[in-house]
Image (spheres, rainbow, N blue to C red):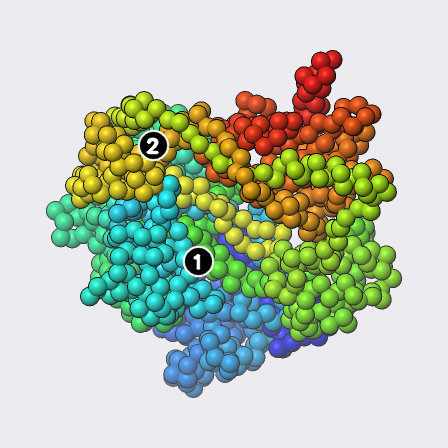
Amino acid sequence: MLFPSSTLDSGYNFTIEMETGTGKTYVYLRTILELYEAYNFMKFIIVVPTIAIRKGIEKSIEMLRDHFKTLYNGLDISKYAFVYDSNNMGKLDDFVEARDLRIAIMNIQAFNKDTNKIRKEDERGKILWEMLKYVNPIVIIDEPQRLEGSGRRKSASLQAIEELNPLFILRYSATHKKLYNQVYKLDSYEAYNQDLVKKIEVKTVYGSISKEYNYVRYVEFTKDLKAKIEIFYSEPGESIRLKTFNVLKGASLYELSGGLPQYRNMIVLEDPHKINGLKIGSGDNVLVLKEGENNYDVDELDLIRIQIRLTIQAHFQKQLKILEKGYKIKVLSLFFIDAVKNFRDSESPDGRGIYAKIFDEEYERIIHDPRFNEVFKKYSELFPEYKNVQKVREGYFARDKKNNEIEIEDFDWSKDELQMKAKSQEDIERGIQLILEKKDELISFEEPLAFIFSHSALREGWDNPNVFQLCTLKKGSSEIAKKQEIGRGLRLPVDIYGNRCFDSDINVLTVVANDYYDHFAEMLQKDFNDEAGFDKEEVTYDVIYMTLEEAGVPKDMLVAETIEAFKTELVKAGIIDTKNNELTKDAAEILYYEFENPVLKTYEKSIKEKFVEKMQEKGSKRIEIKNGDEEPVPNGYHSFVTEREFQKLWNELRERIVKRTVYKVKIDSEQFISECISEINDNLKFKTIRREFMVAEGRAEYGNSRMFKLADAAETSISLKDEGIEVTKTDFEIVNYLMHHTMLPRKAIFKIIAGLENKRLLQKQAVLDEVMKLILDKLTEYEVKNIDYEVIDGYVFQENTIFAVEEIERYMLDNKRAYKTNEDYKKTLYKYIKVDSDGEYEFARSLDADPDVLLFTKLKKGGLTIDTPYGNYSPDWAVIYRIDVSSAKLYFIVETKCDKEKKDLTRVEDAKIKCAKKHFAKVADDVTFDWVDGYRRFKEIVNRELTRRTGT
């Protein structure tokens, strides 16, 4: 929805915003016919920026001709529409003189210069350009943002259009630079929510890097002018893993890595730069990385192979799913390649380029794989020639005047087609013509062709709705992460009869790229949000509508007047400006402003809260995120009637839990070494070393704030061929590494290594890390089994860390993450107790209500820590329970594992609980420690202890 405008800006220009793939061409062709039928407007000029778009319009007119005939009393639009050709000026003459509908389709290049033929006097003394001005045509601009240029002044193209004296101008695009009198908006968010386009699924492929390599990736140039890099990192007892750091000049990669030898002497030489990159010195060598690059030279053809494999597999899986659901929809896959010769190579004996060879090999393998060939078994009549790889794949490329496939010399992904040479544009046009001629046939199962290879230059010429897989076979393929390019596959599919399919379960476009997922996601998200004009600080119609709706304003009152009234309140409060509706101060400032509108005043408090919440969701920086509109809830001490008695209880509890302990372990070394050898040998017995590639996969989605984002990736790996093992580590180096990470004696490590059957595998860092973890796990298992604790005399935990006052936020109370204790009961020191779950909240409430609980408290995390072989452990609760009316009491330390059964406890959880029991048995013989899944189990433990203590 749009805010109403009180005035017309920039003359009779009107903006129609429609998401790519939602039928923009259909809408403006239909608009022409409606204006002709309803108002007898007859002269229309469709202005296009590129040949590719013009060709698409021609094809649409051809395909929609019969459809429009049924809607407009047999009117044949193809008889009234023509493409302007400077070599055939007669049609434009007819356009001016005819007293009936005429639709001229013109490239902007045909009339935006004084030298254009249309502006010159012809042999009859006529200047067609001047004649066009007198008919006041209605101008429709397709993709107007491409005609506006980058300067502040109007471009020559826009000036030329205005010279035509148009009756009015209609601007159609998904990505307007400027909005002139916007009358309609169907943006990415609405198209996505209304299932008018395919959803997007991303799969990225990248090499799995050997952990011995001095790998560095320049992830991004940060806002605080640092370089975010990714390198390998090691810490004692942990496997080597990838970790990111923000660095400046002088940073030592060796120190950052935790002392990994491959980074020795690697220093950041200069402060990073977004354009010039990051310079890292290593001895006499200098490594220069651009943003997004890394120094790992992976076999590019292996990556290409996996991309092709994934695309073919996804293709067959999608085709089977569609047919199983009863749709007669043929699936297509599109491959963007970087060079024609990679598909069609005249120097190769069989004419195939390397990509074609890889495709053929992978296709042949997959069609015989039972996991993927079920579609051919079940629906063989639809795919009679599926085994003929020559017929299922084809390439479409730019062509010269002799119809030879050629490379586009000056093609650059960052350039607009208009910036290319005239010859290049003509060559692209010929290639597009071929691909469009095949468009209708491709949706039929009678045509076996299903896998299309195309040069990137044809990106805007390809818009077949049945493309379900889009694969870019080129280095640095985040370049394909552009809304316009991916838009080629977002159109909803059609069946063999031309019927559109609206089933969101199958309408998913899979994009396969060779890039790191985080980098690809960042590029794609940025481009989608930039193209959509997403502004974190803008208060849109939708933000106000959702604010009022969620604040409880009745549906019948959610009308334009109410929306406008709230916008007016925001302007009066100085929260937003009047020009762009952007925040000018913290959104939370609305909390201190009194509404004037009587309707809004009824829901004032909730409207203010929801408005702040909505701007938080948008990611606005003009807001105090931490506490929203509420000050922290003051958490303090209860005021007790019997202070002395309570203090006595508190002291008793404190004395029983503040003592520190240290653990000791007795291990049978020979048995331990023997079991380590046996377990490692079993683990390595059938291990092979293969080249691994990681595949990261995630879906795109829109949040309530309309921000486009990719979900966190799910990662899998794909292996290619066995990898040779090169001996680079001595036994001494291997032993030193294991000693450093396990803290075991050198002699024990040598004995373990000597007993291994496949010691050569330890040359691979990944295997060495695996062995290190096996040894550590076995050591921990032995330690827990044989552990004992001793109290350290004179050393205690600090009371102020165990019983520290927790800071309570208002949202914690609203969401049951803080329990307000009953002041009448006086059972705990603090008014509020911070909890981690609904189960803990109910446990606190039950303790508070139990008349036999004398005192309870939640122990602050990290305040009381028990040292265990699995790391430090902190229990949750301390409770004093009354045995009888006299002074007899029970003391409990409780670990809450709410809604878990004993069998659900992890191995680590169970081991830590066992260690804690031994700890508390040493610090106080009258303290019972155990875990509970809720209040009922706590009472069972109490009753057990009562029986043990009293014998009843």
* Residue occupying image coordinates x 19% and y 34%: 760
Choose between 42 and 46: the one closer to the eye. 46
Residue 108, image x, y percentages = 44, 73
Q: Which residue is mark 2?
A: 775
Q: From what the image shows, is residue 283 above or below residue 912? A: below
Residue 380, image x, y percentages = 36, 27
* Residue occupying image coordinates x 46% and y 75%: 149
SS label for mark 2:
helix
**In which quadrant of the rendered view does residue 383 lie?**
top left
Disc nearest the viewer among 1 and 2: 2
144 on left or right of 948: left
Q: Which residue is mark 1?
A: 523
Q: From what the image shows, is residue 770 above or below residue 699? A: above
132 on left or right of 760: right
How many other residues sit within 10 Å of disc 2, few (<14), some (14-19) or many (≥20)? many
Residue 476, image x, y percentages = 33, 57
* Residue occupying image coordinates x 18% and y 41%: 730
Sequence-first tag of 1 and 2: 1
How many other residues sit within 10 Å of disc 1, few (<14), some (14-19) or many (≥20)? some
740 on left or right of 647: left
